[in-house]
Image: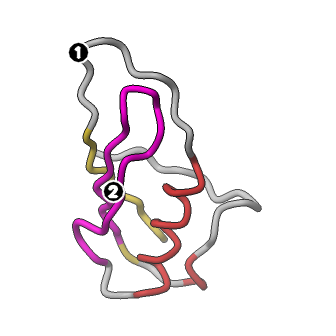
Amino acid sequence: QGAEVPRSDGLPGGGGGRGTVVVAFSVLRSGVLNGARIARSSGNSTLDGSVLAAVRGAGPFPTPPAGANLSFAMPFYFK
């Protein structure tokens, strides 16, 4: 189950739409974003674009520990 991320002034709100977007992304061992894509669309391109922008703007990420998984799929919920 995904965590609910509260909207902040820096996070696009999706234009008031509702739905769930699943984004898949990976990071390099340095914490730099390696790539991000929509794994499951909400059916609303504004919501999907908001999630991609948020993930791409969140880096760099903390350096992962040795042996850590470097690929993730995370749901974002818009209510």
Q: Nearer the viewer, residue 9 or 58?
A: 58
Q: Quadrant of residue 23?
A: bottom left
Q: Main secondary structure of the magenta part?
A: strand
Above or below, 61 relative to 66: below
| Discs 2/1, front | 1
Does the magenta portion include 48?
no
Above or below, 48 relative to 60: below
Please state which amino acid type lies under the numbered disc 2.
Answer: Pro
Residue span colored magenta: 20-41
Q: CA distance from mark 2 to mark 1?
A: 24 Å
Q: Quadrant of residue 57?
A: bottom right
Estimate the x, y position of residue 42 in percent, counting from the top left: 32, 79
Identity of the residue drawn at 39% across and 21% down: 64
Q: Quadrant of residue 41?
A: bottom left
Identity of the residue drawn at 41% across and 44% down: 3
Q: Nearer the viewer, residue 3 or 56?
A: 56
Q: Which mark is residue 67?
A: 1
Mark with earlier residue (2, 1): 1
Q: Residues within 10 Å of mark 2 (few under 14, many from 20)?
A: some
Identity of the residue drawn at 38% across and 76% down: 19
Estimate the x, y position of residue 38 in percent, counting from the top left: 30, 69
> Residue pushed farthest right?
9
Please state which amino acid type lies under the numbered disc 1.
Answer: Gly
Secondary element at tag 1: loop
Q: Which mark is residue 75?
A: 2
Estimate the x, y position of residue 77 in percent, counting from the top left: 42, 63
